[in-house]
Image (spheres, helix red, strand yellow):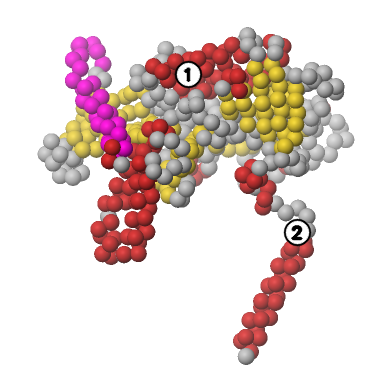
Amino acid sequence: MAEQQQLAQDLFEDMQRKVDEASQIPLGDNEQKLVEEIESLCMNCHKDGITKLLLTRIPFFREIVIMSFDCPHCGCHNSEVQPAGEIQQQGHKFTFKVETLDDLQRQLVKSDTCVFRLEDIDLEIPAGRGQLTNVEGILSMVAEDLQTEQPERKEVAPEIYERIEQVIRTLNSYASGYTLPLTISVDDPAGNSWIEPSTTDARGKYLRTTYDRTAEQNTVLGLAPTEEPPDGVQMRPEYHAQQMYPHMPANDAPLDQDQDDIVENQVYSFPATCPGCSKPCATNMKMVNIPHFKQVVIMSTVCDHCGYRSNEVKTGGEVPEKGRRITVSVEKPEDLSRDILKSESCVLSCPQLELQVEPGTLGGRFTTIEGLLTQVRDDLHSSIFGDDDNAGGGDSMLAEERERWNNFFERLDKAIKGEIKFTVVLEDPLASSYVQSFTAPEPDDQIKVEDYERTDQEEEELGLKDIKTEGYEEHANQARTEEERAKEFLDNVVKQ
């Protein structure tokens, strides 16, 4: 276990070594200094120390600032990581299942606004100091932090001491790889935290989701809302369906149309709050009827203040009894123009391309096969190599890993251009996804549709096990009867 913990410590020492080496590089008169040195107050001895700042790039992630403090008087040392970029438009949450010793070496960036959770034992590290480490390192650091106050707890609160001692043993067992698997998650409303991905991750092992921040989270991040709404938008305390107003001319809708009904292909606009900056904006909504499928709602939000943009597709109707798996064979370039609807609950996979998109990663999308693959490529390429094509993923990316990612994007580019044949599989437990058929209403030989029984895990994740749509009145009456019997029993006990 000592050898495993030493690996995590080596990562911090390597970070400190890079900062020290960069600070010793001789520079010309017109060259920019790589490492900035600032005199800082030591909080241990209250004398002046030196803080070194280095701007660097993390492979698969983005630019960060590495800060290292040294005090020559008392020897106090501290290292910290902060994001160098701006706050992202949406929050990010990464969920990772650690199954092997190699998974413990995955790099992890925890910003000062991130919450780290160990799901198996319900252990949470609140937002605090930013860290650059790996999975094993953060587990070992949590165990060391808990161990610091154990002697005092043993004397003051022996029961709490025993409980925390058990947690420490569990963390050390996880960090050494003796107890696997385990599930960890990092939830950052600023979107500046990250867990290293891999092309070999199986389904359900690595999950990245984005979400809109709440008003409280925006307040914590310093994104204060404004009281001035944009032009043409009237903010109200509460919004109801009848308060929506058509964005298009009123004469486009039937004259006898009831105001509470939503007309197909009519664009509606209603006031909203931008999740990126908490300022007022407008959300446009349009109902579209997809032939041979169902009605869907397309929603688009654009913020004129911060530039936030989002597009989502919502499907309606009842929850089907079974899930649906759609397999479409892309054999010629014309197949790339098929319309495709990927719902939020759908898993998209292409076995020939070694591509898999987990539920919630892209949200609901209504586009073409080519458009969906292009979006996946752009988002993933930006995450791996950054916005600069010449970045190469950073100088610390292993050559083998860089070659693996380059081969992956090369296959994906050929698929988008229609140069290779591949298969797209949409597995949706809510049967809300769709692929256009070129021979509808006749069956299409290139599309295979099959229904399947949902697993217990899918039922639990969708919340279907807690839904009771039939016989709930009888259940409520039975609960009231039992309550009356209990009350009567207690009354008799009191009388006796």
- Residue at image position (63%, 89%) is 495
What is the x, y in percent for residue 110?
Answer: 39, 37
Residue 392: x and y in percent read 41, 15
Q: Which residue is mark 2?
A: 472
Question: Is residue 493 visible to us here?
Answer: yes
The stretch in magenta equals 4-32
Q: Which mark is residue 17?
A: none
Tell me: 199 left or right of 144. right
Residue 303: image x %, image y %?
57, 29
170 part of magenta stretch: no
Q: Is residue 25 magenta?
A: yes
Q: What crowding class fits label 1: few (fewer than 14 Cα within 10 Å), some (14-19), or many (20 or more)?
A: some
The residue carrying mark 1 is 405
Distance (Cα) linking label 1 and label 2? 53 Å
* Residue 312 picture location, percent across and down: 64, 31
- The extreme bottom residue here reads 496
> Residue 455: which quarter of the image?
top right
Magenta stretch secondary structure, dominant: helix
The secondary structure type at the circle numbered 2 is helix
- Amino acid type, residue under disc 1 in the picture: Trp
Looking at the image, tell me whether mark 1 or mark 2 is earlier in sequence order: 1
Compared with 375, 149 (above or below) is: below
Viewer-side residue, 131 vs 283: 131
Q: Quadrant of the C terminus?
A: bottom right
